[in-house]
Each structure stands twice: as C-alpha cells, then as structure tokens.
Amino acid sequence: MLSNDDLKWMYRMMLLMRESEEKAIMLSKKGELPTLLSGSGEEAIPVGICASLHPDDYFQPHHRGMSDGLAKGLDPKLLFAECYGKPAGICKGKGGNMHIADFQHGNIGIYAILGAGLPISTGVALAQKMQKTNRVIVAMIGDGGSSEGTFHESLNMAAIWKLPIVYVVQNNQYAMTTSVSDAISVKDISDRAKSYGIPGATIDGTDVLAVYETVYEAVERARRGDGPSLVECKTMRWYGHHSGAGDDEQMGWRYRPEGEAEKARENDPITKLEKYLLDKQILTEKEAEDIKQSVKKEIEDAVTFAKSCPDPKPEDALKGLFTE
Amino acid sequence: MREIMFVQAINEALREELKRDEKVFIMGEDIHTGVFGQTRGLFEEFGGERVRNTPLAELSFTGVGIGAAMGGMRPIVEYMFSDLVLLALDQLANQAGKLRYIFGEQINFPVTFRTMNIGGGAAGQHSDSAVSYLMHSMGLKIIMPSTPYDAKGLLKSAIRDDNPVVYFDEAKLMMRKGEVPEEDYTIPIGKGDIKREGKDVTVVAVGFAELLAESAAEKLAKENISVEIVDPRTIVPLDEEIILNSVKKTGRLVVCIDEQPVSSFTSEVAAIVADKGFEFLKAPIKRVARENVPVPHSAIMENYVVLNEDKVIKAIRDVL
Ligand SMILES: Cc1ncc(C[n+]2csc(CCOP(=O)(O)OP(=O)(O)O)c2C)c(N)n1
Ligand SMILES: [Mg+2]
C-alpha cells in the first residue's frame, strides 16, 4: 500500500520531471540544448512504474522524456550536465538526452533505436532469474516501437522462460507524425498479450495511481516467478514529436487535429494527483506551494551546475570503446 | 602432445568454461543437440538453464545476451551460421559495440557471440562470412582462428574478456587436427602468430585461408619459393606489428580470407601496409578473396567463386 509519504513523493517527482522537461525546452529554444522529445504530460507512467519497484530493481525508460530516470534516483545535476555534453554528466557527455542511463540506480538506459531496449531488458531479466536475485525489470516502449520485431521476439522469449519482466507501452497516440490507427491493427495494444499467453491490461496513463496499482501487481507477479505481463498506458503528447528548437510547427508538420494537444492538458496527471491529495487532506495548499518552489530551485541549481562544469577535451572522444 | 580436431577443441573450451564459471552460459537455436558438434554433450552435462535453446529470433536473442551480460552473467550467444548474423546487426553494431561508450563507461559487456561460416552447396544464404560486416562496426573484438590450439585458447580468452567478442568458426576447418595440451591455457586476443617462416613473400591468412596458405606454401617450397605465413588470429584488434615486420623482411604481401573482397579484411590489411609499410614493398599488394557474387549452389561454380589453393598460389606467383 502507498503511504502518504509515497504519494507526496509521486507528486514531487512528477513536478520535478515536468520542470526538467519544460526547462529543457526553454534552453533548447535559446540554442543551448538540442531538439528534444518532450515527456511533458506523460510523467504519471514512469513515476507510477518506479513507485512500484524496489531500489535494486531495474528500469528501462521510454525514449520520450529524458527525465524518466529521475524517478529511479538519477540526480538532476548529472542529467543536465549530460545534456550540456559535460564529462560530469551521467554518460560523460557521450550519450546525451537520447541515452540517459544510470546503472547505479538500476536504470539501464534509453535506447534511441526504438525496440532495441526490449530484448536487452529481457536479457537483464534472464540474468536475474538465473542468479536468483529476486529483482525485476520494467521495460518501456512507445506505441510506435511496439511494432518492431523485437517486441514480438522479446515477449515470446520472456513468456516461454517465465522471466521477471513487465513491458509497459506508453501509448500517446502517435509515432512521430503517424497515428496509431494507421499503424496498429488492434484497438488496445495490450490485446497482443494473448498471443504470448501472458496477462495484458490497458489503463489510463494520466492516472498515476492506476499506473502504480497495475504495474505493482504485474511486478509482484513477476517477482513471484509467474512471468511477464504487458501493460498499456494510454496517454497524450502535450507537444509535437519534437519540442524546443526545430519543433513540429517550425518543421511545418501538420498531422494533428486542431485543439487536440490543448485538450490533452485538461488531463494533466499532476493536477489530477494534486486534487486527490488536497481532497483527501494528505497535502495542504501551502505544502503544495512549497514543493513547487523547491522543485524549481532544484532544477535551477542543476542547470547552474551543468553550465559551470568543465568542457571535455576533444580527444576524450577517443576513450571508452573497450575496457582493458 | 595429444592431437584433437578443431571441433573438439571448441567443445572442450566451452565445457571447461561452463565448469569454471557458473556465470557462463550458452544460448542459441538447437543448441541442445549441437547441430555441428561444437556443443555436443553440453546440454546433458549442464542442463537447459545453462545450455539454453532459443526460439528463432536472432535479433532479440542477441539482445538477450547483451542484457544478460549487463545483468551479471557471462553469456555465449551462438548463431547457427554466419548469414544469420545479419539479422542481428542492430543488436551487434548499434548496441553491443556502442553501449559502453554511449553510456560513458558505466558498464561492461562480457558477452561472446559465436558463429560458423559454412557453404558447400548451401548457396547464397548459407555460405557467407560476416567477418567484414562486423569489422566495419565498432566496439566488437573479432576472432577467427585456424588451428585447434588457437581455437581453444582464443575461445577461452573471448569468454573471459569483459568486452563483446565475436568468434568465427569455419566449417572447412572443423576436422583439422592439431596438438592441444590437456591443461588450461589461453591465447591473448590481438596477438598474431607466424605459422610458417619464410623470406620471399608474406601471406597474411586467417581461418580456412590459413590452411590453404600452408598447402600452397608446401607446393611452392618445391620450387624454392619461401613463403612466410602470418596468421593474425584476431581481426579486431589487428596485430599490425607482426604483419609490418614480416613485410619488412620479405618485401611482398598477399592477403587471404574466404569471403567477399569489397570493404573487407583484405582491403584493410592492404591499406594498413600501403600506409605504414610502403617503403618495404617490392611489388604491388595482392588480395585473395571470393569473387564478388553470392555463392552459387553448383559445386563447379561455387569452387570458382570461393577461395581455393589455386587462387592463393597464383597471387603469390604474381608478386614474385
Ligand atoms: C528503430 C527506429 N526507427 C525509427 C526511429 C525514428 N523515430 C524516433 S521517435 C519515432 C516515433 C516513436 O514513436 P513511439 O514509439 O510511439 O514513441 P513516442 O515518441 O510517441 O513517445 C521515430 C519513428 C528510431 N529512433 N528508431
Ligand atoms: Mg507514441
């Protein structure tokens, strides 16, 4: 069961991620950071997932939303230093926002080749089962990525070997500019679970408590040795595919009905949780305001830190391919 | 010393490493029966957890191997034959080879990928070598031994290495016999070996090509042509020094491998010697490889396309 502290953690974490994403868009528009794939509005999914995991469990984040890793323990300073390409960044400035990984906290990284992270996560799960560690992994993929062959191959292998893994599809209705209705043969992607003989569920991805409850159940099932599950979280993108410099509007991409993106904002997962916490008197208005201020400051400090870190030497590029 | 066949050397290395380290396991299609004999008996001895049969899913079982290495194991991933490696190219080239670098050295990938170059009437989709496809990618060590002794010692090194290593067998070498000690030994990755000393011409040859180079050298010795055979054994990292030192001595270079010629192992060795050893050369460098077409089914056409002893002998004569 979630304690009040857990609920407040979820609230603060979603705010922290939102602040990171929005700050990054602003910095991208200023030309300091590259074009981004904003996860704004989709925070409930990584936060609900990470709330259901133990600290030593594994997590493979979605590629949209560079800040998913924060929910698994990543320090925002190391995130922003990475975005600025600094050696102090979590990947020494080599990975950038499309490859945030944080192995110390069990975050095995964002895979910019969509679908590539699924078999790798499946292998992490196999290693846990073989070593009897009792650890579980949650692997994320988009609606677009769920059409890659690795999705089928991975779910099949995880099912035959009963691996401790949960696959979560973040279905935000689009893959770049292609609507799910043009790319996916089923109404609910979780229907595909039937082909592998595993449980599948479709839930509201803007409801962090629903994400938590469903993923928690699947994670504990996996931990018991009963094998994988597929959870589809339906959500909406707040922005286009790209945001910041070179966003969809600047690119002249027209594919979304008028007003759709604005409508998504009516379903803000943070507002929804805030209302719940205030209604239940778990949080006061004053506490909510304090949390918002502290989150702003934490991200402000992270950006200041990132900018103040020394740059790499060009020839640092040659290091790190092999280990001795 | 006792003599064993190449295929037995591989089988022994796998068995001994599975015994030595419980983190080692092997996975692939039909691995429990050991289709070509390399894994024979391992399933019976170590069970299905550690000698793991996979469904037909080359791309994803490659990823599973990478992930298992990430998660604390030391996997060996087998592809039934070389052409199937191309199905796994994303996981090998974009993932296994790059991830340590991309993730800022947070993690190592102690995983070995193994396959075999086959052929013999098997035609255009069962006869390729994937060596040069992978040589072009980054972050993968690549091994292709030619003798049972090298095969066993290098396979053990590959399994114990903390980097991703791709290890190629060649079907035409499986019955080759050679001396292999009973006791544990390893051969360092990245060190070539002079398989035959000579003074007139350097023949750089890997895998099955090395066997052809030996028989060619034997025949040419009768005509007082003295061939030096350099077997790099490892393709990445390449032992440039042993090649350059030999060319310095002989002044002539022939490079051989049994695969297609364009953008390949042979082009790379030729380019390195042209770049760093030009002043040693008394003749143009010759490359001996397959004809640049898919391997045809007809034995008559296949023999014409693939590497053979006549091609090696002709190339040696050409540079003399
Ligand atoms: C294998 C692969 N194909 C294409 C791309 C280019 N690409 C980047 S994001 C994207 C759309 C992804 O859609 P989805 O999986 O639904 O995730 P979303 O961006 O909507 O969160 C595409 C096609 C890629 N990175 N990888
Ligand atoms: Mg999408």
Image (tube, grey):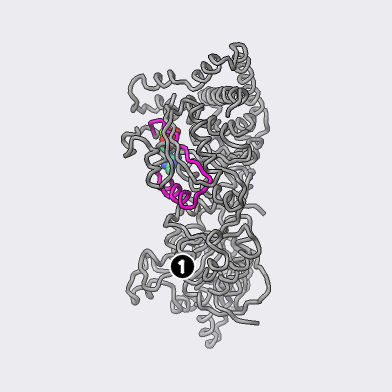
Camera-side residue: B122 or B249? B122
Q: Position of residue B84 (x, y in %)?
A: 43, 60
- Looking at the rendering, the stretch of residues picked out in magenta corresponds to A147-174
Q: Is residue B289 above or below residue A263?
A: below
Q: Position of residue B304 (x, y in %)?
A: 37, 74
Q: Is residue B16 above or below residue B99?
A: below
Image-quarter location of ligand 1: top left
Is residue A187 at all visible to an observer of this figure?
Answer: yes
Q: Is residue A46 magenta?
A: no
Camera-side residue: A120 or B149? A120
Q: How many marks?
A: 1
Location of the N terminus of chain B by quadrant is bottom right
Give the class, few, some or many, for how many residues have Cα within 10 Å of label 1's Cα (few <14, many ≥20): many
Q: Residue at x 45, y 34 (%)?
A: A170
Q: Amino acid at mark 1?
A: Asn
Label 1: which residue?
Answer: B117
Chain identifier of the residue bearing label 1 in the image: B
